[in-house]
Amino acid sequence: MESSPRHPSPRLWIRQPLSCADPAAANGVVIQDSRIVERLATGQEPSLPVDQVFDASQHVLLPGLVNTHHHFYQTLTRAYSAALNKPLFPWLTTLYDVWANLDEEQIAVASELAMVELLLSGCTTVADHHYVFSQALESAIDRQVETARRLGVRAALTRGSMSVGRDQGGLPPQSVVQDEARILDDSRRLIQHYHQPEEGAMITVALAPCSPFSVSRELMRATADLAKAEGVRLHTHLAETEDETRYCERLFGLRPLDYLDDCGWLNDRTWLAHGIHFTNEEIQRLGRAGTGIAHCPSSNMVLGSGLCPTLELERAGVPLGLAVDGSASNDHSNLAEEMRQAMLLGRLRYRPDQIGHDDVIRWATQGSARCLGRTDIGGLAPGQQADLALFKLDEPRFSGAENLLAALLLCGAHRADRVMVAGRWRVIDGAIPDLDLGALMARHQEAARRLWRAL
């Protein structure tokens, strides 16, 4: 018996955008299934008939933005009075006592709000670094996987860890410090259950000790060995403040990057958050290794951490991505706004003609994808995943703009009108279909209040 012929899936033309981040896609892109199958230059028409057309003549088209570092749970402690106006270490010690009371319901609603906020800002791939595990919060990554799947967003989730608490001279309370064997066992479990190594993956898992001084040297090395054996990536905070440098020199007799190298982390499967305080020689080493940096401009400003040497890093060959960082040191999860911050902060370190809107858009798309070890996202080339962000310029802030792509950053775009992930619309008319945003915010606010009251 002959099988019935398979009908080809529909072809969708995102037609004639107002402007596009990729000049080769000035007349739009054609989507089939989850991929881009054609990229159309000015005046070019699709090579085959299309089934559907989306008129993008009122939209600026970007590849979906890719966030490379966040702490979703911190949406519950935005603008927290006791932590205001403090540098990193005092800020951390203040908030650790709050975060130690997190439970599973709170991490679930915090993660949902953070992912929604990112998605509405044009972000199609979210990354989170979760390292707070108390007895009431042992399945945080599982809850995040469930949320990402429900929202249809692509997620790079990292299994963080802390094994050195205050009793051993560390910063976190003992209630969120875990046994190292338990950390490694749970890391294996999460990789085996959720990590998708294939192209087009919706969920990936990486291993991410909170910082080199939050875990032992043995756990840093064991984590690197496990990541290599399982074929997953590594992530941690590094070179965020001068206090961190002095701490590592006192504790290990090494600068942070030297210690990272000693633990087997300096390779092209690693990306690091912040990356501010590197010497010129260290920047070259990072480039030779192919180790990525997640640039966190707003967080760096809030905590007074310093200016990331973005252009030097990129020139050295370092994959450079963009990140909102945690919502207790930003205090938002809006990647479109973070692009503007990155450009303006860059102008304090470099001349205006050295860093422009196109550089920052590249960091937030192609560069961020490289940090996550992916070539199938971050662009509009045929064969890449159909992850798109489309912005309307219909607010007063955009009126009079001549360069429409630059206007996204200079005039302060903050909310996408349409967002597509893997060929499916996840944001339509600036909203997520079937999501009651008001109800989510009410649940989130109550979870935050409950966390504050726990002290």
Image (cartoon, grey):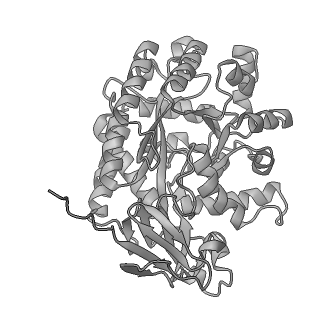
Could you say which is closer to the camera, residue 42 or residue 59? 42
Residue 143 in the image: x percent, y percent?
Answer: 32, 39
Reply above or below: 166 against 443: above
Q: Is residue 176 left or right of residue 319?
A: left
Is residue 121 visible from the viewing direction of this image?
no
Q: Is residue 317 left or right of residue 170?
A: right
Residue drawn at x 47%, y 47% is: 199
Is residue 53 visible from the viewing direction of this image?
yes
Residue 214 placement: quadrant: top right
Residue 301 in the image: x percent, y percent?
Answer: 67, 49
Could you say which is closer to the camera, residue 308 or residue 127? 127
Q: Residue furthest left?
A: 1
Residue 51 in the image: x percent, y percent?
Answer: 36, 78
Could you say which is closer to the camera, residue 385 or residue 56? 385
Residue drawn at x 73%, y 16% is: 250
Residue drawn at x 83%, y 57% is: 350
Q: Is residue 352 left or right of residue 392?
A: right
Q: Is residue 238 left or right of residue 70?
A: right
Q: Quadrant of the C terminus?
A: top left
Q: Residue furthest front?
A: 1
